[in-house]
Amino acid sequence: MEGKTQEIKYAVKDSVFTLLFSDIENVRKLYQSLHNDAEQYEATDFKIVTLENAIINGQYNDLGFTVKDRLIILVEAQSTFNPNMGVRLLMYIAKSYHDYIVENKLNIFGERLIKLPMPEFIVVYSGTAKQNVNEIRLSDCFEAGTTTNIELIVKVIKKDNVKSGILQEYLSFCDMYNINVKGKKTAAERLSELRQVIRECINNDILREFFKKHQKEVEDMMMTVIPPEQALEFIKLEEY
C-alpha cells in the first residue's frame, strides 16, 4: 500500500514529464540531450510508441519512442528510485517489440532474418534522496555468482550528470518543486508555491514555452492529485 500511495503522491512531476513529452518536438529535444547526432533527424523521424498507461498502478512505461527504424528508446521518470527497472523495462521492451512486429507485419516464423530497432533504456531520477547509481542491470536481480546469457542495462540520468538540454530543464523544475512545493500541507499552499515555481521557470528560461502554454494544465494536475487516504480506498476497491 505504501508504495502505491507514494506513486500517486508524486504524480505532479510525473504528469509534467508525460505532458512535456507528448509533443514530438520535445521528444526530438530529449533525443538531442542523449545523443550527438540529433541534427541529422527531423521531427518526422520520431514516433511516440508509449504503451497505454493505467490510472493508478498499471504496468506501463512513461515514454517510448522510435528514431526512424534505428532506435527504440524507453524512458521512465521516477521520484522514488527503483532498482527493479531492469525487470520492468524487460517487460516493456517485449511488449513494444510485439507491437512493432505486428504494426510492420514482420514474420518471426519465416526463414528471413527480421530487423528490429536497437533498444535503449533510460531512467530520469528526480527524487530528493541521494543516488550514486548511474546504471541498473537486469542481471543484478539474478542469484549472485551465476552466469547469464541475458542482460539489459538502464542508464540513470540525474541532475548532476546532465548539463544542458530539455532533461536538465525538466530536472531543474523538479528540484524547484521538491524545495518549494513538496511538503506544503494545504492544497492552497501547494498551488500558490507551484505558481511561483512556474513563474521562476518562465523567467529563467526553464521549459519556458511549455509552461507558458500549459500552466493551467499543470495547476490542474496539482489540484487533482489523489491524497494517500483516498488512494488507499481506490486501491482497496481495485483489489476487491
Image (cartoon, rainbow, N blue to C red):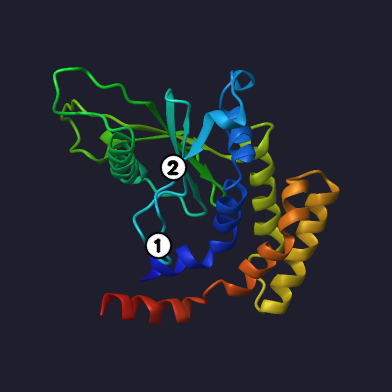
Circle 2 Cα neighbour tier, 10 Å, few/some/many (<14 / 14–19 / ≥20) = some
Coordinates of residue 214 in the picture (x, y in percent):
71, 57
Is 132 displayed left or right of 164 in the figure? left
Coordinates of residue 187 in the picture (x, y in percent):
67, 78
Circle 1 Cα neighbour tier, 10 Å, few/some/many (<14 / 14–19 / ≥20) = few
* Three-letter code, disc 1: Ala
Separation of disc 2 and disc 1 at Cα?
15 Å
Coordinates of residue 53 in the picture (x, y in percent):
41, 57
In this rendered view, identify the residue nearer to me: 64 or 88.
64
* Three-letter code, disc 2: Val
The disc at residue 54 is: 1
Tag 1 secondary structure: loop
Q: Picture quarter containing residue 231?
A: bottom left
| Foreground label between 2 and 1 | 2
Tag 2 secondary structure: loop
- Residue beneath the point at 39% across and 49% down: 51
In this rendered view, identify the residue nearer to me: 6 or 92.
92
Q: Picture quarter containing residue 29?
A: top right
- Residue beneath the point at 44% across and 42% down: 49
Question: Which quarter of the image is occupied by the N terminus?
Answer: bottom left
In this rendering, the answer to whether 14 lies above or below 133 is below
> Is residue 213 at least partly visible in the picture?
yes
Coordinates of residue 43 in the picture (x, y in percent):
61, 31
- Residue beneath the point at 20% across and 28% down: 107
Question: Which residue matches tag 2?
Answer: 49
Report the label total.
2
Farthest front residue in view: 105
Q: Picture quarter containing residue 135?
A: top left
